[in-house]
């Protein structure tokens, strides 16, 4: 049975996708309302499709360009296999397909939720959360299916489906990295482009509609209102989905890479019931189990009481969420103890090989689960309605927009304190438990509940849309009240979801970073070398500039939208009286075009910088290991700074948003109840305007920036791994010089251990050989060992002696 | 003559102080006006003294506490000498004294400038810049005098005034680090406390005076107006002075430390005309030359035309500034070629020893001068009136405060791009020219013009004050017009001065960072070790949280001020009619108390974190080299993130300020001229409110944060340098194991080079010994070498063999 374990994740993924199909057809069978409701919903659906098809067009060009580049590299650099192009393309297709499923179901579920809200709240929750579940399982199922399938294919192709060596496995995983790169590239378009789209439409609709024309939010007379509602789906559904799809794949991949290095540290091969690849299969198995667990979790989300309020809805979501987390912990324990050797050897940098029990690996996964849960609470504290930071911002709104802004900025900044301490603690703890394999498995465990997290996340924008449709189709107030309850809970889950996304991005990047170091074969990244230090600075700067570009992009796109809306208000007769029909599609088109155009520059920054750092010094003939170290410094800079700016921007934005929302129910300022329309409220609205691009565009984009940076590094890694220098080497070159410890007194018994490294096709492996006897005998044996040929598969074998350890 | 070179910097410093005295008495002799002018000026003077005396009281406590701590450490840890306490106290006293001189002259010069502005602009410039010159020379003169004197004293005390070994010199410099720590501690109080003071007073005065009571800026009826004017001196004069005093001392110190390591790399001693300490004396000599050059520079700042505008005044300042920079370049060439050996050996991490010509050291100093000049232009571009970024913010003000804020934030963020690339390039280039010694000398050369920079900087707030006095004493409009011209130029120099300050802080920190690594004896800082990586994260977070705390501190202190002003408006009869007299001193007291109280928390964060990182793991028995590496990661995190946040906050704040100022002369928005009082202007005022704490409190505080962090690291370094483990070691422990390369064929000629490291009192030194002959002979010699005793001064000698290199 154990040998079939490699197929387990596929089976789970297929199970997840089947359940998704069932759930999807159930949602689609629900009453989609009639008349105006249906009409509006169709507009949103078509707008979403318009964005998708424009995005796909651009994406195709992008994928072709990158594929050609990758193909060229794979032909020029012998250590890179052309199959990486195939896996790249499929990574992109799978991710795009997952986004497609999510967008479609979200834009179909919204109107059904509105319709259900006409009868009862429990039904409305059931449908909106059902839509979210489809989205979540689609993403998780496709991610696991794609990654596992390609792993099996490459495992067959390169190794014939049986363990040969860690070097061969490295080639398998390097090729598999293409899949992850493809997925993350789509995330760049979806998250950054989507983030610009949603805020351009939102700001554009508000500035002209609410402010200039004085019509309410979601008013059907506003030409930008459909674009605004499409934006919720583009940004929050497709963007978040692609983000987590990318994290999921990258995390599992990084854990597999580090699993391979565990096998290397244990002598190059292990014997277990899983064909000797237990540590590599484990992360996939955890991901597979996570899908089934997520299905169970989503089933638990329901309420019965039609009079329920936010607390009960939130409670239902929490039951599902916590159950999943606990079940993942249990399954991690089972899988870790079953699939890993009882004790492993892992190389700790600077501390040598250490014995690690499988229990310690389990403890590392627990660290990940704790981080996932705690980061949500931290985010909730800094951005939640009624919490101290929000109340403080509300108070500061009474003295004007300036003090409101300062308070919001300060809240976002302060929130980095517990978040970073949490991350730093998690890195330290999971590393202490099980090295970087532990860090990567912590991330894997956290990401195992991705399907559940996405279901909770996607249900928010669906409910938001449902409310919009209720407003636009002029339903009775009770309908809007019910969707508002769901929307309000959705706002909280959106904030905590962002916390989860950044935590996943941070851990994923660290795992990728570790995988990068092992791929390149450098012995660490020393920031005491000035070039590395300067790249750390440059890397730290990139997230800041990226954020600014994203914010400016929103401003530019919003301005285009404003002009179009103004034009329509002037040009279309009877539009304000509701007799003239606004041209929704033109606004959708503007958002679509502008967002995709404006994401180019930040995208170029993300992709261009690591390539420049890798290839410009290469042209000038710099040593490729030195370049690898510089690039590592850059990656660390981007990650540290990106995580900080993500937390800062997400939480400041979330805090401003809820400070503004606080005025809806009324707040007490200096002993007086203050409501919407007051000066303090206006100040809070200004804060929210600033916060919008923070929390929906630049903040979440940081995730993609840091992951994509580390992934590009990982894909470049084999080129930098000192291989370019091997080009001219003869076949089977072996240079052996044995160092012998001469001691003064010639006592009797001695033994020598030679540690040597063989390098085949750029992949290094370290082995040991021990000699015993008198000192003279040992010396003889050492001399003899110099003359032996070390037999290694592959054409180029380079042998270097690392260490001779002689003892008496 | 050369042997007297050690006294040259002292002579130059004394010359500078004498010139300062002459200039000071000239300024004091000028007409100080009469009646109301004099009265107001006296209030400001007394307010400034009140702040100083309150600050000194708090400082004394702080200095005593830290001294006791340092004393305890120096008695417990044998590698730390108690004289560090003395140098710490004197560092604090010198810095405080320099601040005292600056504050006093600034608050005496303001009214004399107003009086001079009644007759002519050239005179007003002459006096206000004269005040600035006194400030600049006071700071630079005392810094060089103090540092050089203590160096000579310690050089005599520990080494008898002649070269003995790099280890002894290390002890001299470690003890001297106390002086730098003392100076930087004062800077913490002056810059952070001062920053909170100035903005609390400003915001408090504005909120009640301008907004609630509707009276203009600097109106004498406003009880907070004196505090506001005092604040300009406390923040911009004393704060900036202490900041640059600290940078100046720290830079020279770091360069001396690295100079000592150049000598070490050259074999432990060199023969030159300067008693073998040329590389150590050089940074002091450059600083000394800089003082004389600055005097020349300040003499060139004058205008003749009474009808001159901003451009001419700016031009006059530029003539002085550029002349100083060019003269520093010339003197660097002369000093470098004269004082350094023609070729030196420097260890480049990972690349081994390299030959470096003195010309390359000169090129490194040029890099520093270029950075100083270019960073000012970059800052000027992003914050200057009429420049593209400002015009864009002005345009965005037309759609409200929200878009104005976004545009300002984006400008600050984008401005990190050229700035960080400049710094990264500078690190790389100066390191490539001459290693970390080059980096430190680049900083030293840049800082050589400190006196000139400070003169230009201090003249701004003096002119600002002069304008305030003109307003309050109701002078004719022409007086205010003239002071406004000076003030406007002062605003530009304030922004570029901040650029200079952050560049100096960045380079200083890097130099300190390099000195730290050499002091601890660790072989680099490897961020691929998880504990180091987590500390990089934590370090990156600290500047963000520090900034938030500083911003919140301004908010709290401003609120106290608002309440006091409101109380006075109610309680004092006739205050609004000008018949009742406001109680200025109460407002001054509130600003003083609040600012000193509110700086505690950020101060604690700055000092506490590095101590926690160093000592908590030590209690848990962690290896001290591992701790040193973690602390290094933390320092790097703080520096990278701190530099980014400093640039971001300073430039965003400066940009908002000038966007608001643009409305005074009128701006064209969408084809319409828009002025003060318009909605767009109100939006710009909101932006300026947000920018105020950014540019005057949290932004400039980053300099202190990063420098103090690195200095604390440097002072802790000897404790972490692996010494704690030596405690129980026997005297003269020598362990030698020689590794010999056995080759298969026994050919004739061989030679072996043994590289070994001796460690005495925790200070390591690497030496080489070479053996030649047949292989057998070489082996014999190696065996023999094992039995020799390596004779080293000091009680504990530890010998480890690093490398045996055998060739045929």
Image: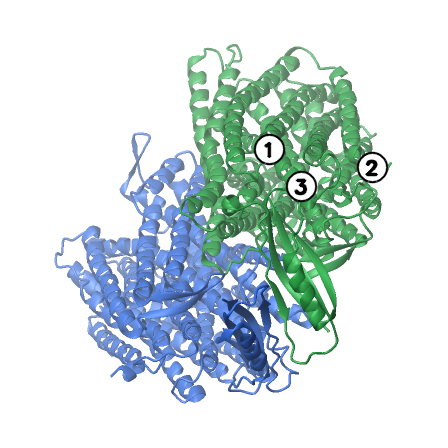
Chain colours: A green, B blue
Q: Could you tell whether B95 is left or right of B335 in the image?
A: right
Circle 2 — which element?
helix
Instruction: State the quadrant of the N terminus of chain A.
Output: top right
Residue of label 3: A168
From what the image shows, is residue A751 above or below residue A684? below
Query: How many residues crowd mark 2 within 10 Å: few (<14), some (14–19), many (20+)?
Result: few
Task: Give whichever of A73, B255 is nearer the camera.
Answer: A73
Residue of label 1: A84
Label 2 marks a residue whose chain is: A
**Residue A345 percent coordinates (x, y):** 74, 55
Is there any visible trace of residue A587 in the rendered image?
Answer: yes
Residue of label 2: A3
Q: How many marks?
A: 3
Instruction: Give the CA distance from mark 2 to mark 3.
Output: 20 Å
Label 1 marks a residue whose chain is: A
Task: Give whichever of A241, A494 is nearer the camera.
Answer: A241
Q: Could you tell whether A565 is left or right of B490 in the image?
A: right
**Residue A113 percent coordinates (x, y):** 71, 22
Mark closest to the chain's N terminus, 2 or 3: 2
């Amino acid at each position: 049975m154990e040998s079939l374990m490699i197929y387990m994740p596929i089976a789970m993924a297929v199970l997840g996708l089947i359940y998704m199909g069932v759930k999807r057809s159930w949602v689609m069978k629900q009453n989609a309302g009639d008349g105006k409701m249906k009409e509006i919903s169709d507009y949103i659906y078509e707008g979403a499709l318009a964005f998708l098809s424009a995005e796909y067009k651009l994406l195709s060009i992008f994928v072709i360009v990158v594929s050609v580049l990758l193909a060229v590299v794979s032909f020029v650099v012998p250590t890179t296999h052309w199959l990486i192009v195939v896996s790249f393309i499929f990574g992109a297709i799978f991710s795009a397909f997952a986004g497609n499923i999510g967008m479609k179901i979200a834009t179909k579920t919204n109107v059904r939720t509105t319709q259900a809200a006409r009868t009862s709240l429990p039904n409305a929750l059931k449908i909106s959360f059902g839509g979210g579940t489809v989205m979540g399982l689609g993403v998780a199922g496709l991610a696991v299916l794609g990654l596992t399938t390609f792993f099996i294919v490459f495992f067959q192709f390169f190794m014939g489906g049986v363990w040969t060596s860690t070097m061969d496995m490295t080639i398998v995983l390097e090729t598999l990295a293409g899949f992850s790169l493809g997925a993350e590239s789509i995330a760049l378009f979806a998250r950054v482009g989507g983030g610009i789209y949603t805020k351009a439409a939102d700001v554009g609709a508000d500035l002209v509609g609410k402010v200039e024309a004085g019509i309410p939010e979601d008013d059907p007379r506003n030409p930008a209102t459909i674009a605004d509602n499409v934006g919720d789906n583009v940004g929050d559904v497709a963007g978040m989905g692609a983000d987590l799809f990318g994290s999921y794949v990258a995390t599992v991949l990084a854990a597999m890479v580090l699993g391979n290095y565990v096998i290397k540290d244990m002598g190059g091969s292990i014997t277990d019931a899983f064909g000797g690849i237990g540590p590599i299969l484990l992360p996939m198995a955890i991901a597979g189990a996570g899908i089934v667990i997520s299905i169970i979790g989503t089933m638990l989300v329901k309420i019965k009481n039609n009079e329920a309020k936010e607390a009960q809805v939130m409670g239902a979501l929490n039951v599902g969420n916590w159950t999943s987390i606990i079940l993942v912990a249990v399954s991690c324990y089972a899988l870790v103890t079953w699939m890993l050797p009882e004790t492993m050897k892992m190389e700790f940098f600077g501390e040598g090989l250490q014995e690690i029990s499988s229990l310690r690996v389990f403890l590392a996964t627990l660290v990940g689960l704790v981080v996932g849960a705690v980061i949500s609470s931290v985010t909730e504290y800094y951005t939640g309605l009624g919490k101290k930071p929000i109340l403080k911002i509300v108070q500061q709104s009474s003295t004007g927009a300036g003090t409101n802004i300062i308070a919001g900025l300060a809240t976002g900044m302060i929130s980095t304190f517990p978040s970073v301490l949490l991350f730093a603690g998690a890195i330290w703890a999971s590393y202490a438990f099980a090295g970087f394999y532990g860090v990567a498995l912590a991330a894997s465990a956290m990401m195992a509940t991705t399907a559940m997290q996405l279901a909770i996340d996607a249900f928010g924008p669906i409910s938001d849309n449902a409310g919009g449709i209720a407003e636009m189709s002029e339903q009775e107030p009770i309908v809007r009240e019910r969707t508002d309850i769901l929307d309000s809970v959705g706002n909280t889950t959106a904030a905590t979801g962002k916390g989860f996304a950044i935590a996943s991005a941070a851990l994923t990047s660290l795992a990728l970073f570790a995988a990068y170091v092992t791929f390149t074969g450098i012995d660490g990244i020393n920031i005491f070398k000035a070039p590395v230090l300067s790249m750390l600075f440059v890397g730290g700067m990139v997230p800041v500039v990226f954020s600014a570009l994203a914010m400016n992009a929103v401003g530019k796109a919003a301005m285009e939208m404003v002009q179009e809306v103004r034009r329509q208000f002037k040009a279309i007769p009877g539009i304000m009286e509701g007799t003239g029909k606004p041209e929704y599609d033109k606004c959708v088109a503007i958002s679509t075009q502008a967002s995709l155009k404006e994401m180019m520059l930040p995208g170029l920054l993300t992709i261009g910088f690591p390539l420049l750092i890798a290839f410009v010094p290469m042209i000038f003939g710099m040593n490729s290991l030195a370049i690898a170290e510089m690039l590592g410094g850059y990656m660390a800079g981007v990650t540290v700074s990106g995580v900080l700016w993500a937390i800062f921007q997400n939480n400041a934005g979330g805090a401003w948003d809820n400070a503004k929302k606080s005025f809806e129910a009324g707040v007490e300022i200096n002993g007086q109840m203050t409501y919407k329309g007051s000066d303090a409220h206006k100040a809070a609205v200004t804060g929210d305007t600033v916060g919008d691009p923070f929390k929906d565009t630049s903040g979440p984009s940081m995730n993609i920036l840091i992951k994509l940076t580390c992934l590009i590094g990982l894909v470049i890694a084999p080129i930098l791994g000192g291989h370019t220098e091997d080009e001219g080497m003869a076949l089977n070159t072996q240079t052996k010089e044995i160092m012998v410890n001469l001691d003064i007194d010639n006592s009797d018994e001695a033994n020598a251990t030679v540690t040597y490294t063989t390098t085949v096709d750029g992949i290094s492996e370290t082995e040991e050989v021990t000699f015993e006897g008198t000192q003279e005998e040992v010396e003889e044996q050492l001399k003899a060992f110099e003359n032996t040929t070390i037999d290694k598969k592959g054409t180029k074998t380079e042998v270097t002696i690392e260490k001779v350890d002689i003892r008496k």
